[in-house]
Image: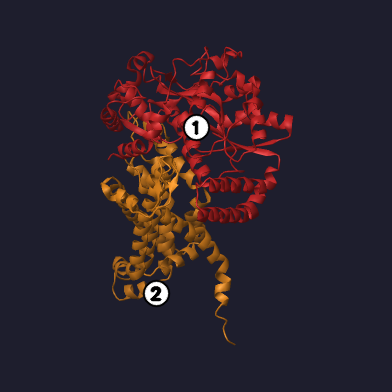
Chain colours: A red, B orange
Amino acid sequence: MGKDLKNRLDDVYQNYLEGNISRRDFVKFAGIAGAALGLAGGPFGLVSRAFAGKNSITCHSWGGTTSEALRKFAFDPFTKATGIEVIDAAFTGMDDFLTQVKASFPPGGEFNIAHLSAVYDYARYTDLGFGVVLDESKIPNMKNVMTKMTDTLRGITNGTLSAVPYDLGQTGIAYNTNEISKADAEKLGASLLYEKSLKGKLGSWGGDFRTNMWYAALHTGQSPNNITDINAVWKVLTEQRSLMKKYWASGSELMSLLANGEIFATVAWSGRVAALQDQGHPIGYLSPNGTYSWMEYMYVLKGTDLDVAQQLLNFMLEPDAAIAVAQGQKYPPALDPTKVAMPDDVKKLPAFDPTGKLDGYLFADVEYWNSHQLEWAEKWDRIIAGA
Amino acid sequence: MKEKPWKPWLLLSPSLTAVFLLLVIPVCFVVVYSFWLRAPSGMDIPAFQFGNYAKFFADSFYPVILLNTIRVALETVIICLIMGYIPAYFFYRTESRLKPYLMILVMLPFWISFIIRTLSWINILGDSGLINHLLLKSGLISSPIPMLYNEGAVIMGLIQYLLPFMILNIYVSLDGIDKSLTEAAKSLGCTEWQAFREITLPLSLPGVSAGCLLVFVLTCGTYLPPMILGGPGNEMIANLIFKRIIGTLDWPFGSAISTILLLLLVLIVYTYNRYMGINQIFKSLSKG
C-alpha cells in the first residue's frame, strides 16, 4: 500500500511540477491520498491484502469458461512455476469495468491486468491515462504474436504497447438452422437481421451502439468505418426495432435466447456461437462481408508491478498455454499460425486466420468510432426506447 | 434523576455515522457531479453549470421515460394493492394456528435472491417455458403465446418483488383495529360488507397508503425487471441512469437524472408525510 501511495503521490507531484495542476489541487490530492490510505489501505485494504499476499497480481477477465481456461492453463501453472499468485477476477462487461477503474483513479493495486476487447477500448483506457509502457524485451514470446495485431495497438500508443494481444473474434450473425436454411442466411447476409418475416424472433445486443450501427451500415450498403448516410442507418435501426423480440444484455442471455428458441437470428459473438454448437444446439454462424472483427488483449493498468505483469504475460503467450486457453474459451489465439502450429480444433474456430495476416478482417476504426461515441450511444438509446 | 440529553445521540451515533458516510455523503457527491462536465475522453471536468439539467428537459425523450416510469409504478401499486389487501385481510381475520406459517410464506421470497426470482420467470413465461410448453402439449394452442419481454412481464416481475411490502403494511394497519368494532357494527344491523366498508377499510387506510408509497418509491428506482423481463421500449429511468453512467461514462448527466428522480421522490414522500405521517411505514417495517 505504501508503494502504491508513493506512486500516486509521485504522479500528482510530477503533474504539479509540470504545471498541469494547481497547488491547491496538489494539496487536495495529497489529502485525498491520505484519506484513501486511511480508509482503503486501513480497515478494508489490509483485509484483501492479507488474503492476496504480497507476491500477487490481479487479472480481470470475462468469467465463465474464459476465466476457467485462463486459470487452468495459464494462472495456476504460472503460480506453480514462479510462486506468484494470480488473483482471478471477473467483470460483467467492458463499460462496467472501465467505470470501476475510473472510480479508483489514480489506479494502483486492485486493478492490474484486464482482458479487454476491441481496439477502441485500448484507446479509451489510454486516453484516460490508465496505460503503461511495457518493456517488450521482457516478453520474448511477443515474437509469435500476429504482427497486424501488435501494429494496431502500437498505432494508438505511439509505437509502444500497454497490452499484449491475446485472442481474436468476430461479432457475426447466429441463426437457428431449424428455422432458417443456410442458403437463405447466406443469401440475405447482414440483411437477415432486418428480415420482416422474422418479426418477433430477432434479437440484438442492446448495450452496444457500434455493433448495431455496424450491421445497419452493411445492410444499407455502406462502409461501417465511414458511414456517409447516417440517417439511413438510424432509419433501418428504427424499423428493425419493431421486429425485435429482445435486446439482450450479456453473453449468457444471448446463449439462453438462442438455445431456448426465443429468437431465431441475432448478432452474436463467435465464441459463444461455437460454444452453443459444441452443446449440440441447431445454431449456424454467418460472417458476411465486412463482419465485425475484434481482438482481445491483456491490458496492463497504471500502478501495476511491471516486472510481475511482464513475467505473467510472457508465460500466457507460451504456445501451450495460449492454445489451451483458446480451446477453452473458443476464440483463436493471437499467435501467428505460420509461426506456431495450431491443433485442428483451433483451426476450426470461427475467426481463425491460417495466414496470420488478418487481411480480410475488418476492425473498427478507433478514431472514427470513439469520436462519435457519446452522440451515437445516446441516439441508439433513443432508438431502442422507441423515441 | 435528571435525564442525560446526549444519551440517545450516543446510542444512535453508530447508525447515524453509517447513514452519513454511506448515504448522505454519496448523495451529495451525486448532486455535485450533476453540475460537472464530461470530457470527450470520458473524464469529468469540475464545473458549476446547469447544462445536464437543460439536456434532460431539452426534448421529450427523458421526461417521457420518467413519466413512463411513474405510470408503470402506479400500475404496479394498484395491482399490488388489490392483490395485497386480500391476504392481509385474511391474516387479520383468521384464527388458524397456521397463521404464523402463512406469514412466513409472505416473507419467503426475501430468502431467495431477487435476480434468481426474476430470471426464473424466463423459464415459466418464455416461448419454450413451462406455460407455453403445457399449452402446446395439450393442444390448446398451436404456437407459443408471447408472454415475455413486454410491459406485462415487467409489471409481473415488479409485483413478485414488491407484493410482500404491500401485504405487511396493510396487515400491520389491520392488526391494530379492534375487532369488537365490527362486531358492534353488525350487532347494530350492519351487514358484513357494510361493516368492512364503513369501519375496517377506513381504519386500514394508513397502512394502505404506506404500502402504496413504499411500492411506488421502490418501483421508480428499480432496474432489474425491465432489463431482464422487458422488451424494446420497456426501459425505466433507472436503466437510463445505468446507461449514462456505465455505458457512456457520462457521470455528470447520469447524476443529473438521478438527482431529478431523487427530487421527485422526495417531493412525493414529503407530500405523503404531510398528510399521512411517515411513521406508519416504520411501524410496518418493524413488524415485518
Query: In the image shown, does B174 or B213 lie closer to the viewer?
Result: B213
What residue is disc 2 on?
B180
Q: Amino acid at mark 2?
A: Ser
Query: In the image shown, does A146 or A327 lie closer to the viewer?
Result: A146
Residue A307 location (% of width, % of height): 67, 34
Pointers 2 and 1 in contact (C-beta within 8 Å)? no
Judged from this view, the residue extending furthest toward the bottom is B1
Q: Quadrant of residue A204?
A: top left
Q: Amino acid at mark 1?
A: Tyr
Answer few, some or many: residues within 10 Å of disc 2's Cα (few below 14, many 20 plus, some between 14 and 19).
few
Q: Which quadrant is the C terminus of chain A positioned in? A: top left
Residue at (54% x, 49% y) in the render: A16
Q: In what element is the residue under mark 1? A: helix
Does B223 sit above or below residue A321?
Answer: below
Q: Quadrant of residue B139?
A: top left
What residue is disc 1 on?
A122
Residue A39 location (% of width, % of height): 60, 55
Q: In what element is the residue under mark 2? A: helix
Residue at (36% x, 42% y) in the render: B153
